[in-house]
Amino acid sequence: MLSGRRYRLELNSVQAELCEMFGDVCRSVWNTALEQRREYRRRGAWMNYVPQAAELAEAKREFPWLADAPSHVLQQTLRDLDKACRAHGTFRVRWRSKARWSPSFRFPTGNRVTVERIARKWGRVKLPKLGWVRFRWSQPPGGDVRSATVTRQGRHWYVSFLVEDGKATPERHAMPDSTVGVDRGVKVAATTSNGDFHDRPFATPGETARLRRLQQQLPRCERGSNRHRAVLARINAITGRVRNRRADFCAQTAAELTARNAVVALEDLRIRNMTASAAGTVEQPGRNVRAKAGLNRAILDKGWHLLELALRSAARRTGAAVVLVNPAYTSQTCNACEHVDPKSRESQADFRCTACGHQDNADVNAAKNILNAAGHAVSGRGDLGTGRSAKRQPPAARNCTGRGPRVVRPAGISVH
């Protein structure tokens, strides 16, 4: 099983400059190759990795600065671009901006990467053209290194190892009859059909106040000035801590849910579409733009997509299955009588059925409906309704798309 291990590097000044240079060269190669692909597509032709890799070798003779970075790192950049263009389309792949893109490059050959432990809290890795680099030994890699990716987050550099740990996904879950539905919300990050609430604040009140002041201060700084860079560095430091806490929360929640349940049901949400801006255009401006922007921030802050990715990754360790169901009417349907009425949800937290009077937490009721839609019936009290009559089964989907439950088998790379 392939797994990811991430460590913080301790670079000296020379190594830090080399990493910055490698990142700049990879960014230039990415942008140049992307523009070449777009120009070919405009003419009705096609460009892929093989001819671009050959042209890169010729460009090194004309532009010697390309040879400053390891050749296999630049080739991996072209491979990543080729994969992105095939998956999303040439004109949907984004440029790598110097101001917005964090330097990153990958050493794809594990036999050129050597990892050693030199102390209780320190290890070192030998990377091409960088030599031996120390890093914080937070955990052993636990397998053979397949590749190493170096990235910068804020003012720190990190290395991520892709390792083969020799483990396999269990054929059967330890508790094969256990199931759970999970409702993702803007007030509570994740609510289960068992009545458990998983949530935590990712930013302290002090960090929120400082971040607001810094964001107000940033537009008053001259772009490119030392003051502008200092304010931006403070903003990145706060948002980096928030991002790490969110990732840690999602990983812990996913590990707990997949360890206790063989089936985890989620709504099949189109989060990118849900968080799109409502500003519209000059000819046709949007409505309720500020309210929609606040909703978008709340959705992104809770990490809905990150939780789904963490569940898929953690499911590989336990053999659990992640089931994605149609989200239509899950928050408006009464789990007891299956009556659908938007007025039944009296508030963000309260649900009172207008037909039978059933009361429950709105998120818990939605989580039970999600589990029902996955084919695992749950009664109004939350227990498994295996003995329920056919009349109490979930109704047919009421939307026109016809999307049924979609099982996501354990896949991806787990990060610990």
Image: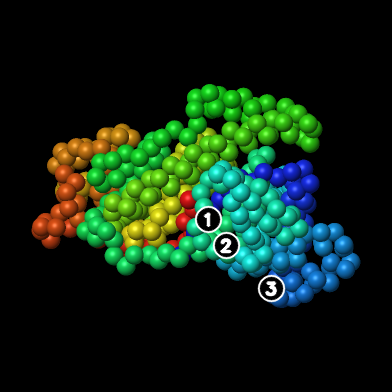
Quadrant housing residue 69: bottom right
Q: Residue at x 19, y 52 (%)?
A: 378
On screen, residue 315 versus residue 115, left or right, reads left
Q: Residues within 10 Å of mark 3 (few under 14, many from 20)?
A: some
As measured in the structure, the alpha-carbon distance from the residue carrying label 3 to the one carrying label 2 is: 28 Å
Q: Which residue is mark 1?
A: 141
Query: Looking at the rendered structure, which numbered label has been put on residue 145?
Result: 2
Residue 388, horizontal then vertical, whole percent: 11, 56
In this rendering, which labeled residue sits more in front, label 3 or label 2? Answer: 2
Q: Which residue is mark 3?
A: 48
Q: Helix, strand or loop at disc 3?
A: loop
Q: Nearer the viewer, residue 337 or 227?
A: 227
Residue 250, horizontal then vertical, whole percent: 43, 45
On screen, residue 267 versus residue 246, left or right, reads left
Q: Residue at x 74, y 72 (%)?
A: 53
As measured in the structure, the alpha-carbon distance from the residue carrying label 1 to the one carrying label 3 is: 34 Å
Residue 249 appears anywhere in the view:
yes
| Amino acid tagged 1 | Pro
| Amino acid tagged 3 | Asn
Dot 3 or dot 2, earlier in sequence = 3
Q: Are marks 2 and 1 in contact (CB under 8 Å)?
A: yes
* Residue furthest front as drawn: 119
Quadrant housing residue 362: top left
Vertically, is 199 above or below 308?
A: above
Q: Residue at x 51, y 64 (%)?
A: 164
Vertically, is 347 above or below 53?
A: above
Q: Helix, strand or loop at disc 1?
A: loop
Q: Nearer the viewer, residue 21 or 42?
A: 21
Q: Residues within 10 Å of mark 2 (few under 14, many from 20)?
A: many
Q: Helix, strand or loop at disc 2?
A: strand
